[in-house]
Image (cartoon, helix red, strand yellow):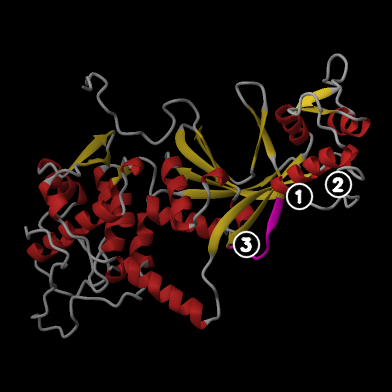
Amino acid sequence: LSSMSAAPPATRSDQADPTPATRAPDEDESSADGQGAAREQHSEEDEEDDVDSEEGSGIQVSPEEMNDLLEFCLFQALKTKVKDKMLPIESGAFYLQYMRPVRPCNAFLDIKRSSFKKLSAFLAHYSQLGVIRVNDKKGTLKLAEVKRNHPKYLDFAPLPHAETYEGAMEQRQKEEEASNGKQPPRPITLEELHRPHRSMYGSLFNEDKQAYYSILECRKALDDYVEKEGLLDPLTPSMVILDPILCDALYAGDSSVEGPIPTHLSRGDLKTRFFSRLQHFFRIQGGRLKNPQIHPAKYEKQPNGKMLAKAPGIYIKTDNRRGHNVTLLRGLELLGLNPEEFASEMREMFAASSSITLLSESDGRKQHEIMFQGYWEKTLASFLQEKYQLPSALIEVKTKGKNAGEKAQKTAKNIIKS
């Protein structure tokens, strides 16, 4: 096989057919990549069906040339797209999602025109060379590890992203959006907002009960009131005297308070108590949202008994339905994402089937839940953060049981570090 180089393998041009062994980057691949949707469990034969040939059946390419191109795409994918936290990756999904997109923009990839003929044989070859490690469990072949200290991996110089098929398609999309007057989506930003308790209006805050306040604005309102009323204890400046208005603001209507209401609080305790009385909201803007969205926070009880305010966002959960391992995802609408388009994109990436169900929430809202065959919670979370630039605070992942999730790479526990 050819030595590792940034220059992609050449394609043959000496055949009688005047059509070169290349394709323009804007050709439609849906007929090829769309064939990757499959069941959760794959046999080896199913796996080969998932990686059907691309277009270009009339182009003559020698097995050796296709071997070179496959090797190039393997190392390009391993170095530029695959991160250790994504592993393991199902072999068909690795070929469709990682290898095909990084091929040179004027080339096509066809495992059946190589000397390997099957994807399993190709991956087994590079596993024997020590470049990767693959697992074959219950008929499902997965890429389990990348040997990043292997000489071939270290010597490989990746092709610039703009010269890959994926890069060319991204550039084309940007040019189309620019010609249509569309601006590229902005990163999604998250801001915590508050509304005062009803006992605080007219004293610490104005009477506008529809207004939202940032953390800094709320802190300033409290500090300004303490300073205006001279409530700092002259003998102990770290303590604040609680006048009737502050007592009402901090304790009115709270039946959980036991014993008499204190007359003094430290500055730290005052702010903690003050913020616990505020209503928490989150403003989400950017990305594909046309206008900023403000949603009430949801609360989660912590081990110490305190309630933590969290932003509503995308919820990912693994489960078992009718004996099948599945991953459930909902909340895309909150971030301006189309559930059907997202599900279609994921089907091609995962080579796994999916279905969509419309759910009714307790607050009357409607939202869609996507169910994917197999465990994909880590890959989904990583994809949402990388492509859609979602903050991790907007993604909640839960697994059903300690073994109900994408398997992490195991490390030896009997190694003594010096």
- Judge from the rendering whether residue 65 lies leftward or rightward of residue 232; answer left or right: left
Residue at position x 82%, y 53% in the image: 211
Q: Is residue 290 above or below residue 282?
A: below
- Where residue 10 appears, as percent x and y from the top left, is 12, 71
The range drawn in magenta is 288-294
Q: Helix, strand, or loop for circle 2?
A: loop
Q: Which residue is mark 3?
A: 289
The kind of residue on which mark 3 rests is Leu
Labelled pair 2, 1 in contact (Cβ < 8 Å): yes
Q: Which mark is residue 213?
A: 1
Residue at position x 20%, y 44% in the image: 148
- Where residue 133 appears, as percent x and y from the top left, is 20, 39
Q: Which residue is mark 2?
A: 205
Say which of 405 and 163 sits in front.
163
Say which of 279 and 361 sits in front.
279
Q: Helix, strand, or loop for circle 3?
A: loop
The kind of residue on which mark 1 rests is Tyr
Q: Quadrant of the C terminus?
A: top left
Q: Quadrant of the N terminus?
A: bottom left
Q: Helix, strand, or loop for circle 1?
A: strand
- Judge from the rendering whether residue 122 lies leftward or rightward of residue 324; answer left or right: left
Classified by dominant secondary structure, the portion drawn in magenta counts as: loop
Give the mark nearer the N terminus: 3 vs 1.
1
Residue at position x 12%, y 70% in the image: 61
Labelled pair 3, 1 in contact (Cβ < 8 Å): no
Whether residue 37 is visible = no
> Mark 3 to mark 2: distance in Å?
30 Å
Whether residue 231 is visible = yes
- Judge from the rendering whether residue 100 lies leftward or rightward of residue 405; answer left or right: left
